Amino acid sequence: MADPVVIEMANKLAEECLAVQNETGEDRLFMEVGTVLGASSQTLEEAFLTAIRTRMANDKGRAFLAQKLKAHRAASGGS
């Protein structure tokens, strides 16, 4: 397991990267950042990519649930 400081850095960088991705529309920016990190620290690269992937998966899971609930409400006449 990575050092807690590395994980904290990776988490902060992941949040910043996702914010830039959302603003610029570059949905694969995180891969470029990962490559830059990997050139000097494989440990930080791995922690960063894990942080990005878990956040992206969380967002997809939440969007899926929201869509399911919307469809259910539409089908049952609820709001």
Image: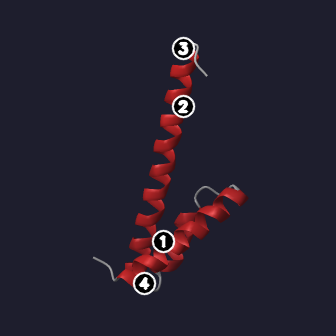
Q: Is residue 32 above or below residue 65?
A: below
Q: Residue at x 37, y 80 (%)?
A: 43
Q: Give the secondary structure at mark 4.
A: loop
Comparing 27 with 39, the one in front is: 27
- The numbered mark, 4 or 2, whose residue comes first in the sequence reads 4
- The numbered mark, 1 or 2, whose residue comes first in the sequence reads 1
- Report the residue marked by disc 3: 75
Q: Position of residue 68 (x, y in %)?
A: 49, 28
Pointer 1 and pointer 2: residues touching (CB < 8 Å)?
no
- The numbered mark, 4 or 1, whose residue comes first in the sequence reads 1
In the picture, measured across the screen, residue 27 lies left or right of residue 58, that is: right
Q: Give the secondary structure at mark 1.
A: helix
Q: CA distance from mark 1 to mark 2?
A: 28 Å
Q: Position of residue 57 (x, y in %)?
A: 45, 50
Q: CA distance from mark 2 to mark 3?
A: 12 Å
Q: CA distance from mark 4 to mark 2?
A: 39 Å
Comparing 57 with 37, the one in front is: 57
- Report the residue marked by disc 1: 11
- Viewer-nearest of discs 3 and 4: 3
- Viewer-nearest of discs 1 and 3: 3
Check disc 4 and give the amino acid type: Ser
Check disc 2 and give the amino acid type: Gln
Pointer 2 and pointer 3: residues touching (CB < 8 Å)?
no
Residue 41: which disc?
A: 4
- The numbered mark, 3 or 4, whose residue comes first in the sequence reads 4
Q: Is residue 37 above or below residue 25?
A: below
- The numbered mark, 1 or 3, whose residue comes first in the sequence reads 1
- Report the residue marked by disc 2: 67
Q: Quadrant of residue 73?
A: top right
